[in-house]
Image (cartoon, rainbow, N blue to C red):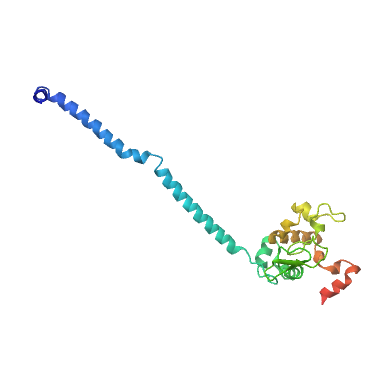
Amino acid sequence: MLKIITYIKQYPKLISIICAYSFLGIGSQIVTAKHVPDLQPSVTPVTVVAISNVSFKKTHVEERVVTEELLPIFKHGDISWLPKLAAEAGWPKETWEKLGQIILRESGGCPVRFGGSIVDKNCNFVGHDGSNHRSDSGLLQINGVHWKKDHPNYAGLVCKKMKICTQEPLFDAVTNLKAGKLIYDVTGNWAAWDPCYWGPKFAKRCAAMSK
């Protein structure tokens, strides 16, 4: 201890320099110890990821709810959804009244209906009437002559123009309405759904529709 005091008295400047460096060393260690946690990737990124996931899930749920609210509820005999979906499919407003009449007659407003199918009030399939026109599809009961690419007698217009060559896509309401609009535009009338255009063989059906 005596020697240390002697050195301090003899070399005061040297001792001051040593103390200063020692202090800086301690200070740098304090700073490093203080800031290292902030630089560790296990802290901040985890927090960000957690927040991001929560935000994504919330947005995803909100979008799903909105989508479900916008989808129409189909019930037999109810076509209150017609203006929205008809407009989306490209049908002009002046055609909506006639279009609605055809939809009610053909499918009752049930988009998943096929030829001969029997449905309940909620458009659920409950049976079949035994008829052989299974290819009639969806809201407008679009026949297989329009969507079958290999039909022997007809052009398969929907298959060629819309690339829909199977029945299943036509059970989507808007897709079915778009296909119907294509047929309507090409023929220039309602002939695809009106037996009065089909010749003498269908005179009785024409008369029944005219009543």
- x%, y% of residue 168? 73, 57
Quarter of the image with the C terminus is bottom right
In this rendering, position of residue 190 left or right of residue 199: left
Asked whether 125 or 168 is in front, the reply is: 125
Residue 51 lies, with reference to residue 210, above or below; the image says: above
Asked whether 157 or 145 is in front, the reply is: 145
Give the number of marks.
0
Residue at left offset 16%, top offset 27%: 16
Residue at left offset 60%, top offset 63%: 70
Image quadrant assignment for residue 170: bottom right
Residue at left offset 16%, top offset 23%: 14
Q: Residue furthest right?
A: 200
- x%, y% of residue 192? 81, 64
In this rendering, position of residue 164 left or right of residue 15: right
Quarter of the image with the N terminus is top left
Residue at left offset 78%, top offset 60%: 183
In this rendering, position of residue 5 left or right of residue 23: left
In this rendering, position of residue 190 left or right of residue 123: right
Residue 161 lies, with reference to residue 91, above or below; the image says: above
Image quadrant assignment for residue 32: top left
- x%, y% of residue 26? 24, 33
Q: Residue furthest bottom?
A: 211
